[in-house]
Image: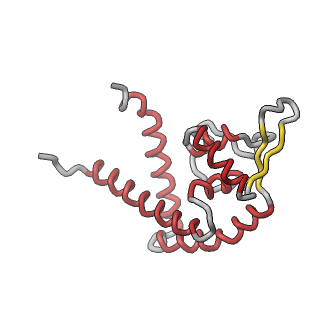
Amino acid sequence: MIDKKVENSIAFAIEDLAKKLSRNNQMLTARMGITAQEWFILLYLAQDPNIPNMRKRGAKTATQITGVFASHIADALNVSRPNITNLISTLMRKNFIEQKEDPQDRRRKHLGLTKKATKLIEEIEPDRLDANQVVLSGFSKEEKEQFIEYLERCYNHLADAESSIFDY
């Protein structure tokens, strides 16, 4: 028999919340003709300061580098490079991302937002804020800041322990 453990309950609650938030993001972005993953790429290129753990994952923000490459996005969003390449190709076909050759290495491509993407982000941002305010409406500012701290601590503990937990 499995005993009730607060650690297991917290893990399930976080996972359930993540699924609900993901579903909400998918519904929000679908109205704009993009997927949630495409939206996150656009937010990364827009240097959204709300994307968590970018530096902790070893990713560089767009302001720390001279150009944003697909590998930076893959690292920041913790997805495979082939997946990012496909998503970037789709966003380029939709005219949301443009790429320019790196002057030092023509094989490398700098990625940036088009005006169409910037307009889309501006259009979706009020709906994003409204949705997040609904989810967190029962919390004070201090509780929200504490919540972020707790989540970051959980993430860091998991990142530190990952290799030993899953090393079999």
Looking at this rendering, what residue extends furthest in the top direction?
168
In the displayed structure, 126 sits above or below 160; it is below
Q: Is residue 95 left or right of residue 78?
A: right
Q: Position of residue 33 (x, y in %)?
A: 62, 66
Q: Nearer the viewer, residue 18 or 161?
A: 18
Quadrant of the image occupied by residue 109 = top right
What residue is at 40 percent from the left and 60 percent from the top? 17
* Scheme of colours in the image: secondary structure
- Residue 137 horizontal side relative to residue 31, left or right: left
Residue 162 is situated, as x and y percent measured from the top left of the image, at: 42, 33
Residue extending furthest toward the front: 93
**Tag count in the figure?**
0
Determine the residue positioned at 59% across, 38% down: 82
Taking the spot 83% from the left edge, 43% from the top edge, the residue there is 100
Residue 6: x percent and y percent?
Answer: 27, 51
Name, please, the residue furthest toward the right.
Answer: 103
Q: Quadrant of residue 96?
A: bottom right
Query: Residue drawn at (74%, 53%), measured in percent from left and top?
Result: 97
| Closer-to-camera residue (53/166) | 166
**In the image: residue 122, left or right of residue 1:** right
> Measured from the top left, where is residue 24 in percent x and y?
49, 66
- State the image quarter where residue 57 is shown: top right
Quadrant where the C terminus lies?
Answer: top left
Q: Toward the viewer: 116 or 137? A: 116
Q: Is residue 144 above or below residue 47?
A: below
83 lies left or right of 119: left
